[in-house]
Amino acid sequence: MERASDYDGGQCDPACKPLRLYYTHVYPFKALFLWLNHGVAPTSLFTKREFAMKLSNGRLIRRQFFQTVEQLQKRLCQCGATRFEIGAIYDDPPVAQSSFSAPQRLRKEFVIDIDITAYDDIRTCCTGKRICRRCWGFLAAAINVLEASLRLQFGYKSILWVFSGQRGVHCWVSDDSAIELKDAHRHAALGWLDVLKNAKGLKTSPAIRRSADLNSPLHPMIRFATSKIPCNFNQLILTTQDAFAWEDRWRCLLGKLSGGSLFQSSLAAAWEAEPERCSLDKWDDILAEAKDLPGYVSRPRRIGLQKSMEDMVLQCMYPRLDVQVSRRSEHLLKAPFCVHPDTGRICVPIDPSTVEEFNPDSVPTLTDILEEISTSQGEPGCLGR
Ligand SMILES: [Zn+2]
């Protein structure tokens, strides 16, 4: 159970003042309420919803419930929360907010989390938590594939994509049928979407095909995704990232091509002799070799080579999901429009129709917003300046 002292640090900490101003004057609480509640009159979608708050002392206060969004706003201002998170809707929230009597039937939006760090083995511009305009393309490709799948394959309509404020994106699916999904159903949906599973790195071998027989059909989700990916591969992987410029990367590429000794040795020798050869030229080399294979190469080997090239495209580009966030409805996820505590950037929504144009470096920070408001007011006002 939370104690009054849990909030005292926030009240006294002057570092919390900008956040209080943000919660008081900027944060779109009304929009948050309408989005979560699906209507104007408060329903259990809001009143029985768990919120959690991260305090400036690092403590995470879970299991907070509010009858109105004004109460939520007041509490955030009171404790100077560095961020707040959204949890599940409980059938029977405990009055004492200390523990839940299991089992509980939970409802929750279906959520997806993708971190750019999942692409560290293929991106070349940044590592770790850093993200830039160039590696944003991985997340843009993932959003394109998943947005289409959620709408066309699952039939969902209420889909919200949000920048996480630092290194990834969150997807919230708010259709009634998504909110009612049991954990087993969420698990099954992930089984469909997360085709790569534990084989998300270049040095792994995902089960893209249903069997070792290369003529067997692709996983249906993979087949669906292939219509969204090829042009992105040329632009993002081969050009923007120049992902096979480094020797360990291009050796990995050659090693994953089926056929063994068809032409891999000769290409390796050629690329060793020309270390500055770019990834686009290397891929063209492979395409040219695959097109002009000697007549003695059997049809199965030709097909095998073609399939392995397709597999490489998919392994580089297919969405790499953080499945643990999606599988369990009790999992918390940072609320849209929160301020990321490390970067100061706002967790803004993303329009999937223009996702390629999104620039994570241009997302406003809390400081930007407060300065803009103070400047526009031109004199001491609500921001105390
Ligand atoms: Zn980058």
Image: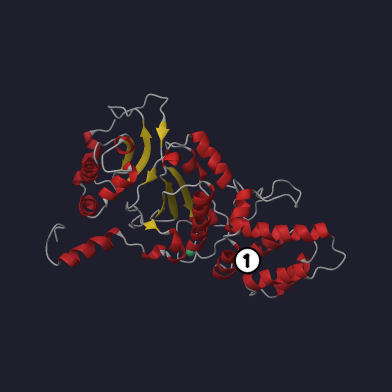
Label 1's element?
A: loop
Residue 281 in picture, x, y percent from top left: 66, 73
Q: What is the quadrant of residue 304 in the picture?
A: bottom right
Residue 22 appearing in the image: yes
Q: What is the quadrant of residue 253 in the picture?
A: bottom right
Residue 60 appearing in the image: no
On screen, residue 255 versus residue 132, left or right, reads right
Pick the front one: 84 or 48: 48
Identify which residue is drawn at 77% across, 59% down: 303
On screen, residue 308 versus residue 129, left or right, reads right
Residue 207 in picture, x, y percent from top left: 66, 48
Q: Which residue is mark 1?
A: 244
**Residue 186 vertical position relative to residue 171 in the rendered view, above or below:** above
Identify which residue is drawn at 12% across, 60% down: 381
- Give the residue type at disc 1: Phe
**Residue 164 vertical position relative to residue 292 in the rendered view, above or below:** above
Pick the front one: 56 or 283: 283
On screen, residue 302 versus residue 340, left or right, reads right
Residue 69 in picture, x, y percent from top left: 25, 42
Identify which residue is drawn at 42% across, 25% down: 103
Q: What is the quadrant of residue 242 in the picture?
A: bottom right
Residue 91 in picture, x, y percent from top left: 36, 29
**Residue 114 vertical position relative to residue 181 in the rendered view, above or below:** below
Quadrant of the image for the C terminus?
bottom left
